[in-house]
Amino acid sequence: MTKLLNGKPIGRPTVEQRKAKEDQAAQEKRELEEWLSVPSGFCEGMIQLNDNPLVLDQWQREFLDFDGRFYILNKARQTGFSFGCAARAVARCYLSPPRQYLGVFVSYNLADAHEKMNYVNMLDEGLPVRVKMKRAKSSSTEIEFANGNRIVPMFMPRGKGPADVMIDELAHITESDKVDQAATPMISRGGAKLIGSSPLGKMGRFHDIWVGTDGKFGGYHRVEVPWWCSTALCIDVEAARTLAPQMVTAERVDVFGTEAIREIFDNYFLEDFQQEYECSWADESTAGLPWELIERCSPTDSPPAQLSSLGELPLLRGQLFVGMDVGRKINATEFSIGERLGNGKVEERLRLTYHNRPLPEQEEIATRILQIASVKAFVVDYTGLGLHIGDSLSQRFGSRVKLVAMSSVTKPQVFNNARAMMERDLFAFYPDREVRRQFHSIKKVITGGGNVIFDVDRNEKHHADKFWASALMLYGAADLNAGRRPCVAVLSGKGD
């Protein structure tokens, strides 16, 4: 006999309960099918990497599912855009009708193109056997699945569309305007142009599209992904997305950064970190040394002790370092002489300026300085007029003389070393107005090719000789600290 409760059978579902359960199962099946039918759901629901389900960042899900025509992403480095491009292409190859999808990877070099194709292979291998398609073609330059959908890498977009054209690091691609122009016709009959890049100064096609230069590029969907939006770089993305934008860089790095991000921040210039990791647009011509930093290293309340003549140098007890920026008629010859204290800090003790002095006289002054035993490194600008003086001094005084050829490669190294020592409070100089002005006159300029050069304003009558003499002096001090020779392109081995 069936037991009843309130007139209804116990332990046996009613017709209404069975119907409700069937409806719920049908709804869950529809939701699952709907989820798997979009690229982000397909990837997270189907793909396993190292026996774990694939989990995308929120911005990656939105990127995979974007169905508009124009998309631009201003992103931090190492946030996973290359991986996102590969995932979008794989998912759409599987989900699109046969022979209806072409995914194009536009990369700035061959290694980056291969990286994306490697990601494609890894993601495809992570699919269940029952789902995985065979391939009609498979190489590092093209993958074609059995349904005719394809993925190809290109350095210059070309060919017929419709296509999903994904351009990585557009700001860093030479002739970025031509690359972007070539990509647009490929989406004339359908598809999308999707651009992702970290910034490289306020210039170039990537910057023009992002800011909408001259009222153009209004149809782009714009997305910004700083480091704290990436689970690979941030320990709590959900909280950071709300709180990090209200913090200064140092604070959010300390609160939300992974160990790697904290170490990178500690060993990076602030504006460089902000451009590479926080989507900040550095000006193409900015002060290389902030005024606040210059003031901190040339304190007016407690300036470093100064000497009045060369004759006083032997009285100093610390190790001495010298930088010589050689000039004659147009530019002055500058000597910067610093003393290293017990705590490793270098204080500039004497600065010598000589206008229109014959080279033999300049060499005689350098000789007097090198005859002081406590001079451990004498660094000469080994270009132009400095070639003769450098060779002569190197032959006579051996390894204490360092010859640095100031080129587009070595000049940033010399500058960066000086700035790093200043930021770590390892350098101090007398707060002379003209010296401060020359320090501040150095401009960090990013060229059209993405190279960084350091120069002065065009209206300056000097070439920042006082700064470069100090920077060369600090380069010699840093080199001796490290127990190695300076990492520059040309160094004299004479007399070593």
Image (cartoon, rainbow, N blue to C red):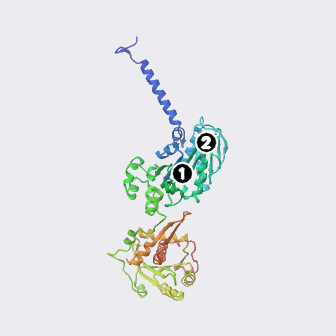
State whether residue 125 appears in this view. no
Res. 187 in view: yes
Residue nearest the viewer, comparing 294 with 124? 294
**Which residue type carries mark 2?**
Tyr
Quadrant in which the C terminus is drawn: bottom right
**Percent position of residue 375, x then y:** 47, 81
- In the rendered view, tell whether residue 439 sits above or below residue 165: below
Query: Which is nearer the eye, 42 or 55?
Result: 42
- Tell me the residue at 43%/57% (across/down): 262
Which label sits on residue 80? none
Quadrant of the image occupied by residue 420: bottom left
Q: Label 2: how many residues lie within 10 Å, few (<14), some (14-19) or many (20+)?
A: many
Residue 195: give its label: 1
Q: Quadrant of the N terminus?
A: top left
Disc 1 residue type (three-letter): Ile
Residue sitting farthest toward the top: 1
- Residue 210 percent across, percent down from the top left: 49, 54
Give the residue furthest to the front.
215
Q: Position of residue 124 (x, y in %)?
A: 59, 42
Query: What distance separates the C-alpha of mark 1 from that of mark 2?
Result: 18 Å
Q: Secondary structure at mark 2?
A: loop
Residue 256 lies, with reference to residue 7, above or below; the image says below
Furthest-left residue in this view: 301
184 sits left or right of 4 in the view: right
Disc 2: which residue: 101
First in sequence: mark 1 or mark 2?
2
Q: Secondary structure at mark 1?
A: strand
